[in-house]
Image: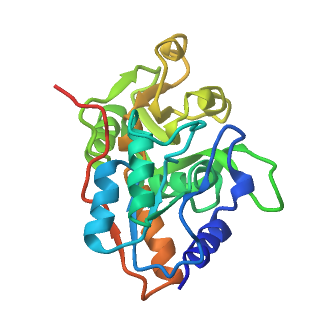
């Protein structure tokens, strides 16, 4: 199949109009009329990821985070973005990104998170009116039974392989109603409070957002990469369902730029 058919399948699942205004989801580089030899799936596109695609003989990378997020005025070797883009072009590797459109879609990134936690009665935390299909930011759902909050935080650490979990205390010692958003979701703390969540977790929370919620709900930050680590599983499932014979692989490279002591 052609790369443009793969892009169409991804956009059927997560239409580009669902992305945020600041985003740049979609084709990043490459010729979509080319036959696809295989798709490498990742969160971030780096030189090492492009090399892995080349080594596998794949000519498509499907990423969550766009390589071309801000404008590029020169393609040289002064930044990792320029070097990665240049390397992809030299090796005829196309790059496609499914970012906030995949975050906001029904069945998208946050649904993948909910599945890993066994949450029930899922609903969007904030509904978005874009196009003619349901879409939203973040999710809220319920654990089957109330859970000690410290046990729940330990569950988050284990399930998402979190090296250093940040949290602030809320009023209760058990949690059941869980609100969350993969990636940078601290803009949804108010919505989590409004829907009666016991805890809200996301990938990143700015320092000042932690203040003033001790009588309302618990807050937790897993790390941006950690909160979205299962997105590549979702991408693989979408492609395998649509193209059973297409070779796909999840990258073996940990692209998280943050290290921990």
The residue closer to the viewer here, 114 or 79, is 79
* Residue most extreme to the bottom: 245
Residue at point 38% right, 54% down? 87
Answer left or right for 47 relative to 129. Answer: left
Image point 31% across, 30% down: which residue? 165
Q: Report the residue that reaches farthest toward the left.
A: 261
Color encoding of the figure: rainbow
Q: Position of residue 21 (x, y in %)?
A: 72, 40
For residue 175, above or below residue 52 = above
Q: Is residue 44 visible?
A: no
Which of 107/240 is in front?
A: 240
Residue in the image at 50% along x and 84% along y? 243
Nearer to us in this view, 257 or 240: 257
Is 131 above or below relative to 237? above
Instruction: Give the percent coordinates (x, y) of residue 2.
Output: 55, 81
Q: Let me know if residue 237 appears in the view.
A: yes
Q: Position of residue 261 (x, y in %)?
A: 16, 25
Residue 105: x percent and y percent?
Answer: 64, 57
Q: How many marks?
A: 0
Left/right of residue 23 with respect to residue 217 in the rendered view: right
Based on the displayed image, in which of its 4 quarters is residue 257 positioned? top left
In the displayed structure, would residue 158 be above or below residue 234?
A: above
């Amino acid at each position: 199949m052609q790369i443009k058919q793969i892009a169409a399948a991804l956009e059927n699942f997560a239409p580009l109009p669902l992305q945020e205004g600041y985003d740049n989801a979609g084709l990043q580089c490459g010729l979509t009329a080319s036959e696809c030899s295989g798709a490498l799936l990742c969160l971030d596109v780096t030189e090492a990821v492009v090399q892995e695609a080349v080594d596998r003989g794949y000519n498509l990378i499907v990423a969550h985070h766009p390589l071309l997020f801000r404008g590029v005025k020169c393609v040289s070797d002064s930044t990792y973005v320029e070097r990665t883009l240049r390397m992809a072009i030299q090796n005829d590797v196309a790059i496609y990104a499914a970012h906030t459109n995949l975050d906001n879609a029904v069945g998208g990134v946050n649904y993948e998170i909910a599945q890993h936690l066994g949450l029930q009665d899922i609903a969007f935390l904030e509904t978005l009116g874009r196009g003619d299909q349901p879409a939203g930011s973040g999710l809220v759902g319920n654990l089957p039974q109330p859970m000690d909050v410290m046990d729940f935080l330990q569950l988050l650490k284990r399930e998402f392989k979190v090296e250093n979990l940040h949290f602030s205390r809320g009023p209760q010692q058990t949690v059941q109603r869980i609100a969350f958003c993969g990636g940078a979701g601290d803009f949804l703390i108010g919505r989590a409070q409004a829907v009666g969540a016991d805890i809200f977790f996301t990938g990143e929370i700015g320092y000042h957002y932690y203040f003033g919620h001790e009588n309302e709900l618990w807050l937790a930050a897993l790390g941006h990469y950690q909160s979205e680590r299962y997105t590549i599983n979702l991408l693989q499932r979408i492609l395998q369902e649509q193209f059973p014979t297409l070779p796909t692989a999840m990258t073996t490279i940990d692209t998280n730029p943050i290290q921990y002591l």
